[in-house]
Image: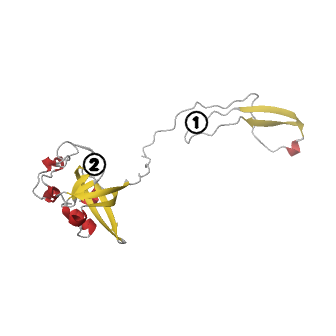
Amino acid sequence: MKYLSLLSLSALPLLALGQVITITITRTTVGPVPTTSVSATPSLPPSSTVSATPSPPPPSSTIVPQPTPSPVIVNTTVSYDPAYGNAGQSLRTVSCSDGPNGLLSKGFTTFGSLPSFPNIGGAFAVTGWNSPACGSCWELSFTSNGTTRRVNVLAVDVAVNSFNVAPAALNTLTGGRAVELGRVNAVARAVAASVCG
């Protein structure tokens, strides 16, 4: 007669990928069993235990991609200021002048030197001198009589809770009605800076 050995594993919690766990194997002997019904299995000495020391997962050289944040989309108003339409105007006159985030530090000197000129202006996202939002690009959308027009504007200055752009940019947005309308309701959406040049 041979004896049947029953092995039991303790319940294990769910573990993170790459963790090492400890497994305890307990041997229990149950009465004699006829040899014809026992399959060949390795036997363990009494009170056998298999264990391993827990260790953190191995370091990874792969950077886990982060989800792309949703673009900023806001309802706002857009007005115009003729100063932003002056190609010779120095960038020293706006909040996004010098400093690490300023446009002078990127090699631009005047409004006309900016690739997106005359589609420039103040934006609510620029909170003051050297703002991280200096040089950000915004798609402005305006709908009138079922027609939606868009213009991409480079943020170069502060505009409290709105956008204040060059007359040419507001004319593009309104179909040539900047002076007539003065200020319009619009939707602003942050887009890649490369869109503005």
Q: Residues within 10 Å of mark 2 (few under 14, many from 20)?
A: few
Of 14 and 169, the residue lying toward us: 169
Badge 2 element: loop
Residue wearing tag 2: 160
Residue 190 shows in the view: no
Q: Which residue in the protein does label 1 denote?
A: 20
- Residue positioned 17% across, 48% down in the render: 94
Q: Is residue 22 visible?
A: yes
Which residue is farthest front? 180
Residue shown at 29% from the left, 61% from the top: 184
Most foreground residue, 58 or 2: 58
Q: Quadrant of residue 78?
A: bottom left
In percent of the image, x 17 and y 56: which residue is there? 84
148 shown above or below 13 = below
Q: Toward the viewer: 33 or 153?
A: 153
| The quadrant where residue 119 appears | bottom left
Q: Position of residue 52 (x, y in %)?
A: 61, 32
Residue 160, placed above or below residue 168: above
Left or right: 124 in relation to 94: right
Sequence-earlier tag: 2 or 1: 1
Name which residue type carries label 1. Val
Dot 1 falls on a residue whose secondary structure is loop
Q: Which residue is drawn at the image coordinates 27% and 67% (left, top)?
A: 174
Report the amino acid beneath label 2: Val
C-alpha separation, residue under disc 2 versus residue under disc 1: 56 Å
